[in-house]
Amino acid sequence: MSQLNLSGPPPNHTYRLMLEPEEKNEELCVRLLKEFVLVLLAASFVILLGWICYETLASLSATAEEKKWAMSSITAIAGGLTGYLIRR
């Protein structure tokens, strides 16, 4: 078995050392529950904003300025969701 000298890695190579604590099942469940609730709240907020914008655009009594604001918001929501899904 060959040994690797970490003081002088081979050319064009790097190394990374990580220490991670063990996660107990209870801690994992709590963490996943917190993440699920956070994602659910964020998704609910985005859906609510999208619905408000759609209602504004469909309204006959909305002014041009309100419709402009609604279109900008829908564009921002779509861009944010696309960026989240693409991870850029």
Image (tube, rainbow, N blue to C red):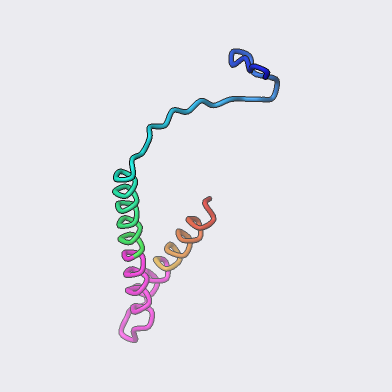
Q: Is residue 36 above or below residue 75?
A: above
Q: Is residue 65 magenta?
A: yes
Q: Is residue 51 magenta?
A: yes
Q: Is residue 1 left or right of residue 73?
A: right
Nearer to me, 64 or 32: 32
Q: Is residue 46 above or below residue 7?
A: below
Q: Position of residue 82 (x, y in %)?
A: 50, 60
Residue under the image location 47 percent in, 28 percent down? 18
Identify the image quadrant of residue 64. bottom left
Q: Position of residue 38 (x, y in %)?
A: 31, 55
Nearer to me, 61 or 12: 12
Residue placed furthest toward the bottom: 60
Residue under the image location 47 percent in, 55 percent down? 84
Residue placed furthest toward the front: 1
Q: Is residue 12 above or below residue 55?
A: above
Residue under the image location 42 percent in, 66 percent down? 72
- Where are the magenta residues, as a range? 44-72
Q: Quadrant of the N terminus?
A: top right
Q: Is residue 13 left or right of residue 36?
A: right
Nearer to me, 70 or 24: 24
Counting labels gives: 0
Q: Magenta stretch mostly in which secondary structure?
A: helix
Q: Position of residue 37 (x, y in %)?
A: 30, 57
Identify the image quadrant of residue 76. bottom left
Q: Position of residue 57 (x, y in %)?
A: 38, 79
Nearer to me, 78 or 23: 23
Residue under the image location 34 percent in, 46 percent down? 28
